[in-house]
């Protein structure tokens, strides 16, 4: 599937999550993908967007936007994990709503606290 076709499919799937997140527009995401600052993952009727984060002591792959059904999301997670290992990442991070905690069962959970200003 071409990038254009993948983006159109992903855009439709991700639209509710983009609206809920309030941090990026569709254009922001597309621009990041085109620049290579973000990566697009599409599997079945699900999609995710990742980025690589470099900390002083390690690199991490971060899933910061995802939507779809649980089984497809788990497959995307497996693909991202394999890709991240190839890039030398030492950690996979997922930013999402609290409900994902029960579904994905990650061993090490950290909390990102936010407050509007």
Image (tube, rainbow, N blue to C red):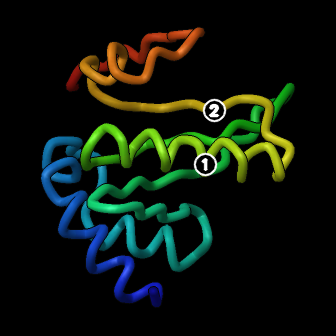
Indicate which label's residue lies in the foreground, 1 or 2: 1
Residue 112, image x, y percentages: 42, 17
Apparent side of residue 3 relative to residue 59 in the rendered image (left or right): left
Q: Disc 1 vs disc 2: Cβ atoms closer than 8 Å?
A: yes
Identify residue for label 1. 80
Apparent side of residue 111 relative to residue 28 in the rendered image (left or right): right
If the image is split into quadrants, where does the C terminus sit? Answer: top left
Identify the image quadrant of residue 21: top left
Dot 2 crowding, Cα within 10 Å, few <14, some 14–19, many 20+: some
Identify residue for label 2. 92
Question: Where is 76 relative to 27, above or below?
Answer: above
Residue plotted at (46% across, 90% down): 2
Q: Nearer the viewer, residue 89 or 69?
A: 69
Residue 86, image x, y percentages: 83, 51
If the image is split into quadrants, where does the N terminus sit? Answer: bottom left
Q: Secondary structure at mark 1?
A: helix
Apparent side of residue 35 relative to residue 46 in the rendered image (left or right): right
Residue plotted at (66% across, 48% down): 52
């Amino acid at each position: 599937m071409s990038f254009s076709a993948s983006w159109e499919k992903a855009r439709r799937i991700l639209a509710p999550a983009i609206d809920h997140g309030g941090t990026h527009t569709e254009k922001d995401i597309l621009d990041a993908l085109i620049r290579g600052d973000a990566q697009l993952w599409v599997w079945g009727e699900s999609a995710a967007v990742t980025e690589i984060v470099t900390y002083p002591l390690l690199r991490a792959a971060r899933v910061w936007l995802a939507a779809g059904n649980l089984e497809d999301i788990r497959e995307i997670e497996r693909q991202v994990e394999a890709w991240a290992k190839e890039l030398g990442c030492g950690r996979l991070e997922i930013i999402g709503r609290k409900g994902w905690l029960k579904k994905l069962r990650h061993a090490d959970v950290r909390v990102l606290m936010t407050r509007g200003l």
